[in-house]
Image: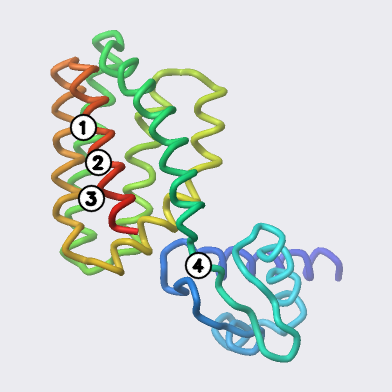
Amino acid sequence: MKLETESATERAYRHVKGRLLDGSLPGGSMTSEGEISAEIGLSRTPVREAFLRLEAEGLLRLYPKRGALVVPVSPAEADDVIEARLLVETHAGRQAAALPDAQHRRLVELLRDLVVAQESAVEDGDLGEYAALDARFHQEIVAAVGNEVLRTFSVGLRERQQRMIAHSVRWDPNQVARFVAGHRSLVDAIERRDGEALAELLVRHLEDARAGL
């Protein structure tokens, strides 16, 4: 019985967190145990436990008898995440541009595939999928350099940045074309092995994301 409860709680947690990260539960909106229970066919108990976990992560704020408020992305959080990403990704970008030939080629091919997938997500109007692909694009650059400390730190930023991008894209859908074009330029710089140009492009790209928020 305990295992079933844990499984149900995990299912509720993944469902709600997925909606928070893809922007379908936007910052400032309200949800409730009853609403989520009806969506996924579970009792309220595992949903309540999932809500408590998400409140501990700073994503929800619970109000007894009223429901759960989705905590908006604050300007301070956006600034902190962008600053951390700039430090990590400009360093990783320079290293990625200097990778040995075989690794370099695999990274460029992977990043170009991710850009194509982003374009498909945009064409389909799936902004949540686009946000996930955006987060993965940047994380793959960091992962490619083989620094486990940086990779782990980047993973920690991933959910925050995914939620931020989903929020900013929904706020101004016209930004999507600029973001995708920016990703293509980043791949081009990596392919040319121009680490300094890549760092400059990353600064402009992330500042554009900051402005969108």
Is residue 34 shown above or below 143?
A: below
Q: Are marks 1 and 2 in contact (CB under 8 Å)?
A: yes
Q: Quadrant of the N terminus?
A: bottom right
Residue 47: x percent and y percent?
A: 69, 76
Q: Which residue is mark 3?
A: 117
Q: Earlier in the sequence, mark 2 or mark 4?
A: 4
Q: Nearer the viewer, mark 4 or mark 3?
A: 4
Q: Earlier in the sequence, mark 2 or mark 3?
A: 3
| Residue nearer the viewer, 110 or 93 | 93
Between the C-alphas of marks 1 and 3, the distance is 21 Å
| Residue nearer the viewer, 85 or 155 | 85
Between the C-alphas of marks 1 and 2, the distance is 6 Å
Look at 57% across and 80% down and name the residue there.
Answer: 40
Pointer 3 local density, CA inside 10 Å: few below 14, some 14–19, many at least 20:
some
Is residue 25 shown above or below 117?
A: below
Instruction: Inspect the image, locate mark 1, and give the three-letter code of the amino acid beneath it.
Output: Leu
Instruction: Inspect the image, locate mark 2, and give the three-letter code of the amino acid beneath it.
Output: His
Residue 197 occupies which quadrant of the picture? top left
Instruction: Inspect the image, locate mark 4, and give the three-letter code of the amino acid beneath it.
Output: Pro
Instruction: Inspect the image, locate mark 3, and give the three-letter code of the amino acid beneath it.
Output: Ala
Q: Which residue is mark 4?
A: 72
Residue 27: x percent and y percent?
A: 48, 71
Look at 44% across and 47% down and name the residue there.
Answer: 79
Q: Earlier in the sequence, mark 1 or mark 3?
A: 3
Look at 50% across and 51% down and name the residue there.
Answer: 159
In the figure, is residue 23 to the left or right of 185? right
Please give the label number shown on residue 205: 2
Q: Earlier in the sequence, mark 4 or mark 3?
A: 4
Q: Which residue is mark 1?
A: 201
Q: Are marks 4 and 1 in contact (CB under 8 Å)?
A: no
Is residue 105 shown above or below 33?
A: above
